[in-house]
Image (cartoon, rainbow, N blue to C red):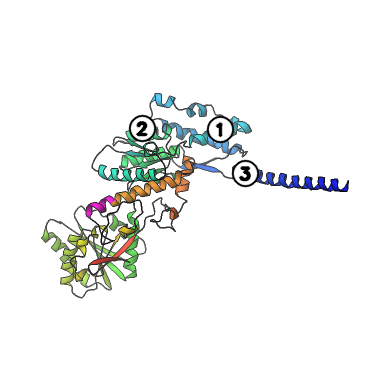
């Protein structure tokens, strides 16, 4: 009897331990359902952003249910307007949310159903991404290189690019871009849209993105972003180059910079440099007609006196290609021998002809670029083999630039959508993950900064002999 009693006691204790363990696991799983509060951003009628929680149905929140009914339907209904009547009829959820009543939120079962429907609307049942592009035109060769790279990387990850990547065209009007974007979201159920090459397309994508919580990756460096966090710029941001140049100038004791550029040049880099606060660097600029040698000479000579009289080391920033760089440097160097001028430039300088033949006046000159050694590019970029790791042909360089953008788009899209999270959670993931999965991009940085700009590497080069070296 004593033995039997002990056995029963041991069995009961064993059962108790198993029961406790199961209960603990169930509690943890339950907490996993209860604790997260999936929040979306809604544009209200006054145009400001409000947060609405789409909490799991097991979380008893009447307030969240009432807020969802009050704020979500209006924005969603506006996003349907670009569709035809027939297209709208094919979508199930409008009739569902039309029947929602605030009083239904008092019922635990009904509010669970309501929140589930809203969460379903902002989800994507596919991992598809879409490109919304303008009609074929001048930028088409670059777009095809980008698309080719994205398809190649999707294929290598086991996806069928024919079904995983949709390419849609829209006319250059905002209205047509809205129509196509609405179809992609509500009918194709894509997880992410890439586009925004024109202001009209960018505006349309921002509107649909804000209304439907669909993440958008803007291909244009200057595309405006939406009011919610759903839109991001993936193009290399020039402000990173500007910051690198200004920091280098400050480190070299530069207090005054003289800027030379051709007529109709893109001056965004210069404007960004000038706008960096607390740099304590003054700027003086001159433009010239690159087709007329007397115009170039006049522009440079007008600054020679000030360059020679600069207190400290002057910097000369030349926003032009290597041919003009050699010409301007020669004028300044021979006119002001012995002046410790720091010649500097942007990625237009990058060419073997910058350093061969050697020019003593150019020794120590610097320039910035988004690409370092061509041998250290992502392994999925097709790079021509060269004896010099820092130079390639002009044609190959242009293609590589667009391939890297395609690589960035593919890696971000694959990383953000691989867990099949809701659309409104894709943007949160994109803006919270670091670049650690992509060896080419800065590992310690977030994929996007607080201004929703993609974090790209920046490289500083110095002319050294008949080559350049990375600083």
The residue tagged with tag 1: helix, strand or loop? helix
| Residue 280 appears anywhere in the view | no
Instruction: Report how far apart the C-alphas of labels 1 and 3 lie in the structure.
Output: 22 Å
Q: Position of residue 322 (x, y in %)?
A: 20, 60
Q: Which residue is mark 2?
A: 179
Q: Which residue is mark 1?
A: 114
The residue tagged with tag 2: helix, strand or loop? helix
Q: Which residues are magenta?
A: 382-399
Image check: 6 left or right of 56?
Answer: right
Residue 200 shown in magenta: no
Question: Which of these two is toward me, 258 or 60?
Answer: 60
Instruction: Report how far apart the C-alphas of labels 3 and 2 lie in the structure.
Output: 42 Å
Give the numbered dot on residue 142: none
Q: Position of residue 452 (x, y in %)?
A: 41, 50
Q: Position of residue 373 (x, y in %)?
A: 31, 60
Question: Which of these two is toward me, 390 or 192?
Answer: 390
CB within 8 Å, label 1 to label 2? no
Q: Earlier in the sequence, mark 1 or mark 2?
A: 1
Q: Position of residue 20 (x, y in %)?
A: 71, 46
Q: Earlier in the sequence, mark 1 or mark 3?
A: 3
What residue is at 65 percent from the left and 43 percent from the top? 26
The 10 Å Cα crowd at callout 3, few under 14, some 14 to 19, many 20 or more, is few
| Residue 247 appears anywhere in the view | yes
Q: Which residue is mark 3?
A: 29
Q: Nearer the viewer, mark 1 or mark 3?
A: 3
The 10 Å Cα crowd at callout 2, few under 14, some 14 to 19, many 20 or more, is some
């Amino acid at each position: 009897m004593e033995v039997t009693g002990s056995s029963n006691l041991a069995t009961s204790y064993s059962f108790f331990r198993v029961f406790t363990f199961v209960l603990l696991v169930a509690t943890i799983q339950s907490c996993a359902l209860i604790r997260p509060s999936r929040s979306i951003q809604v544009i209200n009628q006054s145009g400001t952003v409000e947060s609405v929680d789409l909490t799991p149905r097991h979380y008893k929140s009447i307030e969240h249910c009432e807020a969802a009914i009050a704020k979500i339907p209006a924005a969603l209904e506006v996003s349907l307007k670009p569709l035809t009547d027939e297209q709208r009829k094919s979508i199930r959820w409008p009739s569902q949310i039309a029947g929602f009543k605030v009083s239904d939120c008092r019922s635990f079962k009904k509010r669970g159903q309501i929140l589930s429907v809203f969460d379903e609307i902002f989800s994507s049942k596919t991992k598809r991404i879409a490109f919304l592009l303008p009609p074929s035109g001048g930028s088409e060769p670059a777009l095809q290189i980008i698309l080719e790279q994205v398809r190649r990387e999707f294929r290598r990850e086991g996806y069928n690019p024919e079904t995983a990547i949709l390419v849609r065209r829209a006319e250059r009007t905002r209205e047509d871009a809205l129509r196509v974007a609405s179809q992609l979201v509500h009918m194709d159920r894509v997880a992410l849209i890439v586009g925004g090459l024109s202001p009209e397309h960018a505006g349309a994508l921002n509107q649909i993105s804000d209304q439907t919580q669909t993440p958008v990756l803007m291909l244009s460096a200057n595309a405006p972003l939406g009011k919610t966090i759903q839109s991001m710029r993936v193009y290399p941001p020039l402000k990173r180059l500007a910051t690198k140049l200004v920091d280098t100038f400050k480190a070299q004791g530069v207090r005054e910079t003289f800027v030379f550029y051709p007529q109709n040049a893109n001056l965004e880099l210069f404007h960004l440099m000038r706008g960096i606060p607390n740099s304590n660097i003054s700027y003086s600029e001159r433009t010239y007609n690159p087709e007329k040698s007397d115009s170039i000479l006049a522009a440079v000579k007008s600054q020679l006196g000030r360059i020679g009289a600069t207190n400290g080391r002057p910097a000369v920033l030349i926003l032009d290609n290597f041919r003009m760089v050699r010409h301007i440097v020669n004028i300044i160097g021979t006119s002001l021998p012995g002046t410790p001028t720091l010649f500097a430039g942007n990625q237009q300088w990058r060419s073997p002809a910058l350093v061969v033949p050697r020019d003593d006046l150019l020794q120590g000159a610097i320039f910035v670029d988004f690409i370092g050694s061509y041998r250290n590019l992502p392994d999925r970029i097709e790079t021509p083999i060269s004896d010099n790791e820092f130079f390639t042909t002009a044609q190959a360089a242009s293609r590589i630039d667009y391939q890297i953008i395609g690589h960035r788009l593919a890696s971000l899209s694959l990383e953000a959508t691989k867990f099949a999270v809701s659309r409104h959670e894709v943007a949160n993931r994109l803006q919270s993950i670091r670049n650690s999965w992509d060896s080419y991009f800065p590992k310690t940085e977030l994929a996007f900064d607080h201004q929703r700009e993609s974090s790209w590497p920046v490289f500083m080069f110095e002319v050294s002999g008949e080559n350049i070296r990375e600083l």
